[in-house]
Every structure is written in structure tokens, then in C-alpha cells.
Image: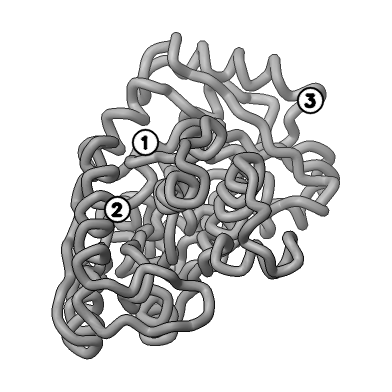
């Protein structure tokens, strides 16, 4: 049994193979330090080459910390290598930095590459080197494979990292256009999570059922509650998540009810949050559910045009206008969703 061990890697992103290696290493020493190595320039370049969002060092540190929470003998640290020569150079500088952040003599280093043993003998002569499953026989995956095709290797991505890769789809539209029902249909079909429209039941839950007493502060609260509901759905997502409404719809209703906008609500409007927007037209039959009050078709059409202009004015991209009956709307939404998460 070793006293102090170190396992370092980029973890770009961390996957089941990484966790298996970390846990195996942790059984062999009293304290294991897991080092998340990050060279900002290299990270940006690697992610760009894989056509994926940048996974900075802090977010990778958070993912591993979440996964290893509760194991007090495993410590996760971030090592910023941006100002030293990039791999395969800079070993002296790297070894000096490692010794500086590890508060004890390093008895053993764990690695997944046989070549590192020679380097270890030079720069960590006082430490042993133990090689773990570098052939990936148990977990036939790599961070590169995941970056290039996350949905093909979804089962290997750690739960803490999956929200980063999950595709976020906003379902929007004016009242009685089928978006709430179709959002739920899509979630069931794709075996994933969805968030419901908080504002739809806000007056019932917080205002005694009276829509006459709405204040501008209420709409700010709706936007916050919607954000929390969306985040909860995202963390449960299976490749894709569906959101029934967003803060811009909340702003739309603030204008309808009170004739003014909320600065708080506007702060939650984010056109970059969604990978796709599906906007349903109000061409299906208007259904009175006790919460709707715009039955006239001309007014419904005008409100649809106005809501669409709100999205365009705030630079929302990838807006898909979906028309037709309920069946054709669902089929179109399914096809668009499949396109988002198809394997490369």
C-alpha cells in the first residue's frame, strides 16, 4: 500500500475508463491526487478540431469533483500548464509544478501510456510508475472518440459531463398551438427529460388562482423558476432535452398582462442556450382550457408574428417554424430532433 499517489490527465472529457482507473489507483494508496491538466491553448485547439464547445479546466475539475464527491482520500486538483512548453516538451517544468501542488512525497504515479514510464524514471526517480488498462479492453473508448461523436459513445460519458453534450431544444409558440403536449410526446419518444411551462400554473400555485393580481415581480419569479426547472431537466437528459417555453415567452406574457417588460425576465433571455428552436404556428384548433383568452384566429396569427419578431430581434438562430395538424407537427419535430443527435 502506497502512502501518496498521483494520477494525471486532461480528462477532455472524463469517461468511465478514467473513473475505473482512478478508483483502481485509489485502492492502492492512502491518498490519491487526481490532477486535471489544462493548457488553455491546447484545450481550445483540441476542442475546435473536434467541432465541440471548449471544455475548460474548471469545468473538467467540476465534473470529476462531482463524480468523486464523498471519497475523502481522493483529491482532485487543477494544474494550469498554459505557461509552460506543450507536451511532449516541458517535462521538467511540469514535474516541478506537480511537486509544488502535492503536499507530500509522491510514492507512485499512475498512467495509461507505457512511454511515460521512461519519463517518470527521469523526472520522478523517487516514485514508482504503475500502468493501467492502456489497451482499453474493458472500456473501448477515448476522450477523442467522445469529442468527435458524443452520442455514439453516450454510455461512456460520466453523468456529470452529459449535460454539456446534451442537445437543448426549445419548443415555443403562442397559446393553444400544441407545444405542451408535443413536448411531452417528444420526451417520451426519446426517453429523456423535459421541463414544463412554469407560468402556466403560477397563478394557481402562488396567486390563489387569480390572474388579476399579477405584478411585474411575479414575472421575474416565473423566469427564475423556469430556469431552475430547465436546469433540472438538463441534468436528467438522455442525449436531448425539451423545454416547453423560455424567458422570452414569459416576457411576452408580461407585455400582454401588464403592458410592460421586466428587466429581470430579460436577463434570463439567452439566444445561445438552445441548439434548436421549434416554433409552432397557431393554425390548429383553439382549445379552451380555462387559462386561454385569445380565441379569434386573426389575433392568434398576429400574436404569433409578434412573438416570432421578439425572437428574431434578440438574434435567436435555428428557428424552425412548424405548421400542419398535430400528427405532422409531431413527425416534423421527431425528424428535427433525430437530426440533432444522430451519430457522425
Alpha-carbon distance for marks 3 and 1? 34 Å
Q: Nearer the viewer, mark 2 or mark 1?
A: 2
For marks 3 and 1, the one nearer the N-term is 1
Callout 2: SS? loop
Q: Are marks 2 and 3 in contact (CB under 8 Å)?
A: no
Alpha-carbon distance for marks 2 and 3? 47 Å
| Quarter occupied by the C terminus | bottom left
For marks 2 and 1, the one nearer the N-term is 1
Callout 3: SS? loop
Horizontal placement of 303 versus 205: left or right? left
Q: Are marks 2 and 1 in contact (CB under 8 Å)?
A: no
In this figure, which residue is indicated by the disc labeled 3? 105
Q: Where residue 119 sits: x, y (%)?
A: 48, 28
What's the residue at 27%, 72% (across, down)? 296
Please say if 37 is above or below 34: above
Viewer-side residue, 333 vs 71? 333
Callout 1: SS? loop
Alpha-carbon distance for marks 2 and 1? 16 Å
Count of numbered labels shown in the rendering: 3
In this figure, which residue is indicated by the disc labeled 1? 54
Amino acid at each position: 500500500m502506497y502512502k501518496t499517489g498521483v494520477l494525471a490527465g486532461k480528462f477532455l472529457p472524463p469517461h468511465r475508463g478514467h473513473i475505473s482507473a482512478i478508483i483502481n489507483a485509489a485502492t492502492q494508496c492512502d491518498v490519491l491526487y487526481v490532477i486535471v491538466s489544462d493548457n488553455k491553448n491546447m484545450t481550445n485547439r483540441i476542442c475546435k478540431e473536434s467541432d465541440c464547445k471548449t471544455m475548460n479546466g474548471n469545468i473538467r475539475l467540476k465534473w470529476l469533483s462531482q463524480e468523486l464527491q464523498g471519497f475523502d482520500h481522493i483529491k482532485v486538483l487543477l494544474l494550469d500548464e498554459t505557461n509552460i512548453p506543450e507536451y511532449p516538451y516541458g517535462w521538467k517544468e511540469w514535474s516541478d509544478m506537480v511537486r509544488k501542488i502535492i503536499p507530500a512525497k509522491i510514492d507512485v504515479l499512475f498512467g495509461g501510456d507505457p512511454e511515460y514510464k521512461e519519463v517518470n524514471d527521469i523526472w520522478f526517480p523517487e516514485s514508482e510508475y504503475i500502468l493501467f488498462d492502456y489497451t482499453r479492453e474493458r472500456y473501448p473508448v477515448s476522450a477523442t472518440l467522445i469529442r468527435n461523436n458524443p452520442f455514439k459513445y453516450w454510455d461512456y460519458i460520466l453523468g456529470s459531463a452529459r449535460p454539456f453534450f446534451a442537445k437543448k431544444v426549445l419548443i415555443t409558440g403562442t397559446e393553444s398551438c400544441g407545444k405542451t403536449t408535443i413536448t411531452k410526446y417528444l420526451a417520451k419518444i426519446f426517453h429523456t427529460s423535459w421541463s414544463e411551462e412554469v407560468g402556466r400554473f403560477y397563478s394557481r400555485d402562488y396567486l390563489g388562482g387569480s390572474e388579476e393580481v399579477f405584478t411585474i415581480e411575479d414575472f421575474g419569479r416565473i423566469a427564475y423558476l423556469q430556469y431552475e426547472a430547465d436546469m433540472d431537466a438538463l441534468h436528467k437528459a438522455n442525449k436531448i432535452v425539451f423545454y416547453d417555453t423560455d424567458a422570452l415567452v414569459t416576457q411576452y406574457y408580461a407585455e400582454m398582462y401588464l403592458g410592460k417588460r421586466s428587466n429581470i425576465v430579460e436577463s434570463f433571455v439567452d439566444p445561445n442556450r438552445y441548439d434548436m428552436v421549434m416554433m409552432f404556428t397557431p393554425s390548429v384548433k383553439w382549445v379552451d382550457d380555462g387559462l386561454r383568452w385569445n380565441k379569434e384566429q386573426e389575433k392568434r396569427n398576429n400574436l404569433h408574428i409578434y412573438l416570432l419578431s421578439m425572437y428574431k430581434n434578440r438574434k435567436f438562430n435555428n428557428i424552425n417554424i412548424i405548421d400542419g395538424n398535430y400528427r405532422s407537427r409531431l413527425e416534423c419535430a421527431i425528424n428535427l430532433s433525430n437530426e440533432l443527435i444522430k451519430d457522425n
